[in-house]
Image: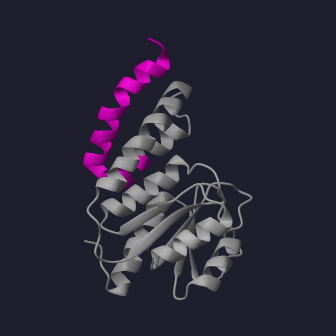
Amino acid sequence: MNSIQIASLSIRPLFAKAVAEGGVVGMWTTVGGPATAGAYGEGMKKAFSEHATGMLSTLLVDAPVGAGLRAVVVAVPGPGPCGIECRALAAALATEGVNTRLVTALDRRARTAVIAAELPDVVVLWIEDANADPMAVIGALKRRVRGLTFVVGGSSSVPESLPGSVHACGTLPEAVATVVALARRSGRRPR
């Protein structure tokens, strides 16, 4: 067995234990973030990324649908596959009781149409590329849907020039805390 095969054998129990002990945010902080940054070696990074995508998707789909705040999580810039951190964010929100949808791999026009059709209260733009322009996405959505609240975050640098009406978050735990706080303030509490 090579190191990737050995790492693959240990991921599911490690992932499950971390989620059981600290939720998705705790798992990301203790295992996911370090693993995807290569802290446990390249074999674990590759194996974790491959396996965690499916496990996070399962958590997102299997979470009870929240009756409160509706959130859409979208990777910026897209199109292309949504990164693992963006998937972890969507799964974390869903398991916190936020009615969450994940929008992935769409061009700008299709992404805007899908988000507008969802009628969310909050749109979380997760920046996966330092050259991303979240204000272009915000502008397109504001022209189609009124009353949206925007949260911008990501592992890539969040632009400093965001308007005050946009909630900026640097990390996944901050983004989850911000959306849950918005749900509580709106009176549309998560589960």
Q: Residue at x 43, y 49 (%)?
A: 29
Q: Residue furthest top?
A: 1
Q: Residue at x 48, y 14 (%)?
A: 2
Measured as percent of width and height from the top left, residue 99 is found at 35, 69
Answer whether residue 18 is magenta in the image: yes
Of 67 and 159, the residue lying toward us: 67
Measured as percent of width and height from the top left, residue 169 is found at 54, 67
Of 141 and 1, the residue lying toward us: 141
Q: Residue furthest right?
A: 131
Of 95 and 82, the residue lying toward us: 82
Answer whether residue 185 is magenta in the image: no
Measured as percent of width and height from the top left, residue 60 is found at 36, 55
Colour mapping: one colour
Q: Residue at x 33, y 80 (%)?
A: 184
Measured as percent of width and height from the top left, residue 132 is found at 71, 61
- Dividing the image into 4 quarters, which one contains the N terminus? top left
Count of number-bearing discs: 0
136 vs 51: above or below: below
Task: Examine the image and state in which quarter residue 61 appears.
Answer: bottom left
Is residue 183 shown left or right of residue 72? Answer: left
- Dividing the image into 4 quarters, which one contains the C terminus? bottom left
Q: Is residue 31 visible?
A: no
Task: Examine the image and state in which quarter residue 94 appears.
Answer: bottom left
Tell me which secondary structure the magenta stretch mostly adopts: helix
Q: Is residue 57 visible?
A: yes
The stretch of residues the image draws in magenta is: 1-29
